Image (cartoon, grey):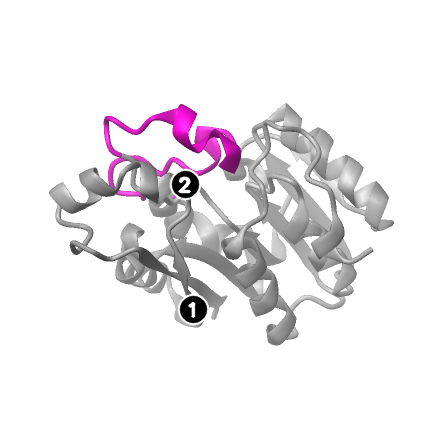
Amino acid sequence: MSVETIAVGAESVYRPQYDSWLLIEALERSNAVAGRRVVDLCTGSGVVAIAAAELGAREVTALDISPGAVCSTQANALAAQVDVEVVLGSWSQAQEHGPFDVVVCNPPYVPVGPETSVGEVAATGPMVSWNGGPDGRSVLDPLCRSAAAMLAEGGSLFLVQSEFADIEQSLASLRMSGMDAKVVADQRIPFGPVLHAQMRWLRDSGRLRHGRVEEQLVVIRADKL
């Protein structure tokens, strides 16, 4: 079954969107997955984990703190007829199951203002799946600092995020941990319901130029030297 046709399942799970597909496309172009041990952090519906399995990964583990996401990933992997070990737990628990050859992650990275209305963006998925805190980096910062410890020698991290969560900070943090980090994919997309719901706050906080309704998504690849 193609990943594009996988049903999301539970309503409490982040729905695959542009960032999910961009991350999968980067994995496809990288040739880094086949025959290797992969972990998908913050897996949500499991769409990236399933794609890794379909790309020939030797072993795939998927982690999420949401019981709904765990159930959805298990159901979607069964429907796609691929083997994915699904673990209920935080992304930070990956070190207990590693090291891995490839770490992939679509983390919560959206900067969220104090007046964001969850009701306006509920169709995107639960707030915890995209809320990256006031600067978008509540998960990105600790993830970038600890990524190298999750990886085997010669392993690679593939991470997707928005420009509004400071791409250069992620690159700098990964490089400081001794990894070779660079942007390997990017895409401009129209604002979805999350950013539309907080456009005023983004402008008032200096993150968004007036009249702009697009954001840049990037995939960062960081290789452990």
Q: Looking at the image, is mark 2 or mark 1 earlier in the sequence?
A: 1
Q: Which residues are magenta?
A: 113-139
At x 49% / y 68%, what residue is drawn?
A: 223
| Front position in the image: 220 or 75 | 75
Displayed quadrant of residue 42: top right
Q: Residue furthest right?
A: 81
| Front position in the image: 220 or 205 | 205
Determine whether, in the image, residue 161 is placed left or right of residue 97: left
| Front position in the image: 39 or 167 | 167
Displayed quadrant of residue 128: top left
Q: Residues within 10 Å of mark 1 (few under 14, many from 20)?
A: some
Displayed quadrant of residue 56: bottom right
Give the image location of residue 112, x and y in percent. Answer: 29, 36
Secondary-structure class at tag 2: helix
* Amino acid type indicated by mark 2: Pro
Secondary-structure class at tag 1: strand
Residue 173 seen in the current view: no
Residue 115: give its label: none
Q: CA distance from mark 2 to mark 1?
A: 20 Å
The residue labelled by disc 2 is 193
Residue 186: give its label: 1
At x 34% / y 65%, what residue is drawn?
A: 175
At x 33% / y 42%, what residue is drawn?
A: 196
| Front position in the image: 189 or 72 | 189
Residue 119 seen in the current view: yes
